[in-house]
Image (cartoon, coloured by chain):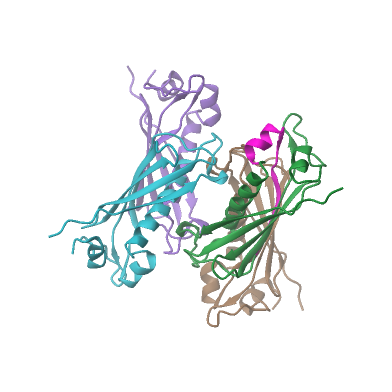
Chain colours: A green, B purple, C cyan, D brown
Amino acid sequence: MPTAKPMSAEVELEVPFHDVDALQIAWHGHYYKYFEAARTKLLRKLDYDVEQMAASGYSWPIIETHCKYVQPLRYGQAIRVWATVREYENRLKIRYRVEDAATREKHATGETVQVAVDLQTNEMCFVSPQALRERLGGG
Amino acid sequence: MPTAKPMSAEVELEVPFHDVDALQIAWHGHYYKYFEAARTKLLRKLDYDVEQMAASGYSWPIIETHCKYVQPLRYGQAIRVWATVREYENRLKIRYRVEDAATREKHATGETVQVAVDLQTNEMCFVSPQALRERLGGG
Amino acid sequence: MPTAKPMSAEVELEVPFHDVDALQIAWHGHYYKYFEAARTKLLRKLDYDVEQMAASGYSWPIIETHCKYVQPLRYGQAIRVWATVREYENRLKIRYRVEDAATREKHATGETVQVAVDLQTNEMCFVSPQALRERLGGG
Amino acid sequence: MPTAKPMSAEVELEVPFHDVDALQIAWHGHYYKYFEAARTKLLRKLDYDVEQMAASGYSWPIIETHCKYVQPLRYGQAIRVWATVREYENRLKIRYRVEDAATREKHATGETVQVAVDLQTNEMCFVSPQALRERLGGG
């Protein structure tokens, strides 16, 4: 069985004023928006964004999120967010890294976990459907 | 023809930390969430929230928003938000007032305008459907 | 006296999944984030972003916002947002236009108004300070 | 040495329309706002909210967040969010539980971790300052 292709994507963002809190740093909950931007790019690279998920008969709700904040982000800071597939056989686990776009210093790492839910039965799948597995080279 | 019943509703909220920006005041765009909280209460009083709208055959997208910021809101401030129907015959115009819950001092006023869109034809209605008019006493 | 230089800036954005509501359209309050992205670019072009404002002795709170929603925005839609200075002598009024990045069709227009507040006295200014006027060519 | 007082707080909230995404469920990143509402209540019970933190000479940035989504939340759902102190000696770890306000069914669990940062030296503290320890009975 072939191993999965290493699969990742990156986006560049700038921390907007409306994400910065009274302590002059990006509020912790907003990082999940930055992760989503990178995840969206990754899923499009796999041709498996929301629309293709639905067409394949599944939705992929997020069942777990996690973030470690290493260094605060400031208003106007240019950041690069990486998303990388870490698991896909039974669930889709994506790992994130937020770094300063210029210095490449690490500012945060994180993870999201999604599972397939069959749109007809509304049941959670314990094995990822073929639609995802074939896109990641695991067949 | 009977005149419309004056119709309003109010909610009490507290400005959360995540709504406060680097200038230590509630970021201007968040006021539309406060308006929505009051509008939701008002529409439920009319038994015409999202679900009843859909059941009546219409959605009511917002086509205009407006807010005047009189005095800034601070973290933890207890506020009262009033929503009052101002027009409903051709479109639903709701007016808002944000005041300090304790002093009743005015902090902001605003307005939203919604129109009915027929869910079958996807056409905008130039007269508000009966489903809304009857709820507001205009028949 | 020379007339003000026409001054505008534009940004390209994509409507993210987390901005789309249960009716499958971008929620109305999020447009003010799109406006802010364009306003930030415009103010940087004038070398008068948050930091320079503070250095000049003023903050510029937003005292009024307005938006007309012409056509809904959908998930993943690429948009262009224009910000243009409309007044600056006594207050800073900026006008916005949101258009589809590909078709250039208009989706929304809007406005924000800001006034200078003296950071020492905490008083609102009825005439815009020189720091802004000189940047806009009005002297 | 006395053991810490068990310390928790709860808030009741309703899932607002603007938190619900295109899949008709509360978007995953918004749960951290619900956690914050409960954490704020807990910290106030300890008389150690943002203002008291600053007065004690520390800020307490969040260095880790985590959430498990057990069952989706729907628009208008009334929820209760519990926040409970789990560690405080070296860092402040708070655990959360989101349940349906009526049925008490579990919808999510989560965690946030904060550390004290000395406002004078800007250094992270490896032992929680007395200001927090005394409030939690650990002396």
Q: Is residue C2 left or right of residue B130?
A: left
Q: Nearer the viewer, residue C134 or A10?
A: A10
Q: Position of residue D116 (x, y in %)?
A: 61, 74
> Is residue B133 depicted above or below A82 in this figure?
above
Q: Nearer the viewer, residue A49 or D17?
A: A49
Q: Residue furthest front?
A: A2
**Image quarter of residue D67:** bottom right
In the displayed structure image, the side of residue C137 where residue B54 appears, left or right? right
Residue B36 part of the magenta segment: no
Q: Is residue A114 visible?
A: yes
Residue C8, position as x, y percentages in the image: 32, 52
Please say whether residue B68 is visible from this viewpoint: no
For the C terminus of chain D, give its image quadrant. bottom right
Q: Which residues are magenta?
A: A49-68
Quick one: D109 or D44, which is closer to the camera? D109
Give the residue displayed 60% in from the left and 65% down from the top. Answer: A99
Identity of the residue drawn at 21% across and 60% down: C126
Residue drawn at x 59%, y 76% is D117
Task: Quadrant for the N terminus of chain D, please.
Answer: bottom right
* A58 lies above or below A35: above
